[in-house]
Amino acid sequence: MKKSTIITASVLAVVIGAAGVTAAVVTSAPPAPVASSEAPQPMTSQDEAQEIEQETEISTSATSTEDLLLYLIEEEKLAHDVYTVLGETWGGNTFSNILASESTHQDQVLNLLNTYGLTDPRSSEIGVFTNPDLQTLYDQLIAQGMTSQTEAYKVGVLIEETDITDLTSAINSTTDSAVVATLEKLRSASESHLAAFSKKL
């Protein structure tokens, strides 16, 4: 067997084993016999930690700029839709003022989607989302915000804190200067919105 064949087979065996899948690697030489009575060795805590770290790295690297933009535009829609409903319910200038900004934020992210040739995932209906996680979050935030005006302001705080965290993560995950510049503007606006909601509590 050539050295390159041995290396390739070894790498494949490691990858398959790490994924927890049982498979046979066929090479030109027969595999060495393995005693059937030999029990599998349990994973140590260090092995588990390394496996989790590898899975996290794979997940992070698989998140493209396109995926981030598709998520972020619906996240901005979530803020807009929640503030629309809670503003109509409780009144006050805080929701109405920030609501206008959220429309602008969506337009800014939409420009990036157009640059990347991406289809806008947003629904025209209030409270309807393509992303199931954002749909669940919207439903939870509306339920909380409808209980009292104080809870509605707490929802505003939570949304802006979440936006800041997600925008920071997105900024750190891309090297596209145009994307970074836009997201930094959105993050700055979210920090102002967070301060406005916090003053109401």
Image (cartoon, grey):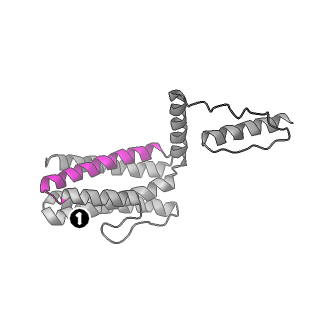
Could you say whether the residue bearing mark 1 is in a helix, strand or loop? helix
Residue 133 lies in quadrant: bottom left
Residue shown at 23% from the left, 49% from the top:
157
Q: Nearer the viewer, residue 92 or 85?
A: 85
Q: How many marks?
A: 1
Span colored in magenta: 146-173
Q: Is residue 76 visible?
A: no
Residue 128 lies in quadrant: bottom left
Q: Is residue 72 visible?
A: yes
Percent position of residue 73, x then y? 39, 59
Quadrant placement of the N terminus: top right
Q: Is residue 170 left or right of residue 90?
A: right
Q: Is residue 18 left or right of residue 30?
A: left
Residue 128 in the magenta stretch? The answer is: no
Percent position of residue 21, x then y? 63, 45
Percent position of residue 103, x then y? 31, 63
Outermost residue, front direction? 37
- Looking at the picture, does residue 105 appear above or below residue 124? above
Disc 1 target residue: 84
Residue 165 in the magenta stretch? The answer is: yes
Q: Nearer the viewer, residue 184 or 46?
A: 46
- Looking at the picture, does residue 189 appear above or below residue 46? below
Residue shown at 42% from the left, 56% from the top:
71
Residue shown at 61% from the left, 39% from the top:
18
Tag 1: Cα neighbours inside 10 Å, few (<14), some, or many (≥20)? some
Q: Name the magenta segment's main secondary structure.
A: helix
Q: Amino acid at mark 1?
A: Thr
- Looking at the picture, does residue 98 appear above or below residue 168? below
Q: Nearer the viewer, residue 26 or 194?
A: 26
Percent position of residue 96, x then y? 19, 62
Q: Is residue 96 left or right of residue 107?
A: left
